[in-house]
Image (cartoon, grey):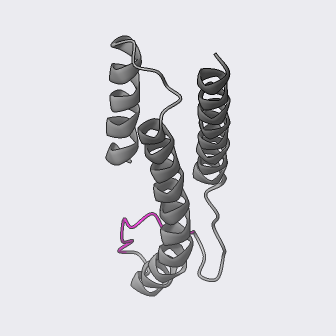
Amino acid sequence: MLYVFIVCAFVARDASRAITPFSAQQVRRTLSVGWVLLGYTLFCLVLDPIAAQVQYAAGVAAVSLFGSPQAGELFINFETLIAAGAFFLFSYILNYGKTLQELADETA
């Protein structure tokens, strides 16, 4: 998650320096954040059943791996899934804006 904050800081830094947000670099940055968040969601989806089994087997000595209360439950982190979708959408918007800016530069 630290990667997401660092990349967002780079995007904000470029915006504060009056660099256009409709560039290939910004599109790559936002797209990479979307992929990282999607990967994190899938990682949690795989890790949670394992952590739940460990916690269920440990009994009273619960292991703090953020496992589900019972083994066999499925935990999907919808917050990061929605955030990944938002970053993919934002990347698409920036890419479309980049295309429109290139077309405007050609006609002017």
Query: Looking at the image, is 49 positioned above or below residue 81?
Result: below
x, y percent for residue 104? 66, 22
Q: Main secondary structure of the magenta part?
A: loop
Q: From this viewpoint, which residue is outermost toward the front?
A: 107
Question: Is 65 one of the magenta-colored residues?
Answer: yes
On screen, residue 60 above or below 87: below
Going 54% across and 51% down the picture, which residue do you hit? 34
Q: Of 40 and 14, which appears nearest the observer? A: 14
The vertical placement of 100 against 65, above or below, is: above
Report which quarter residue 75 is drawn in: bottom right
Name the one closer to the observer, 45 or 64.
45
Q: Residue at x 52, y 49 (%)?
A: 31
Residue at the image point whose x is 66% and y is 53% from the top: 78
Q: Is residue 77 left or right of residue 60?
A: right
Q: Which residues are magenta?
A: 61-68
User: Percent position (x, y) of residue 62?
Assistant: 39, 71
Quarter of the C terminus within the rendering? top right
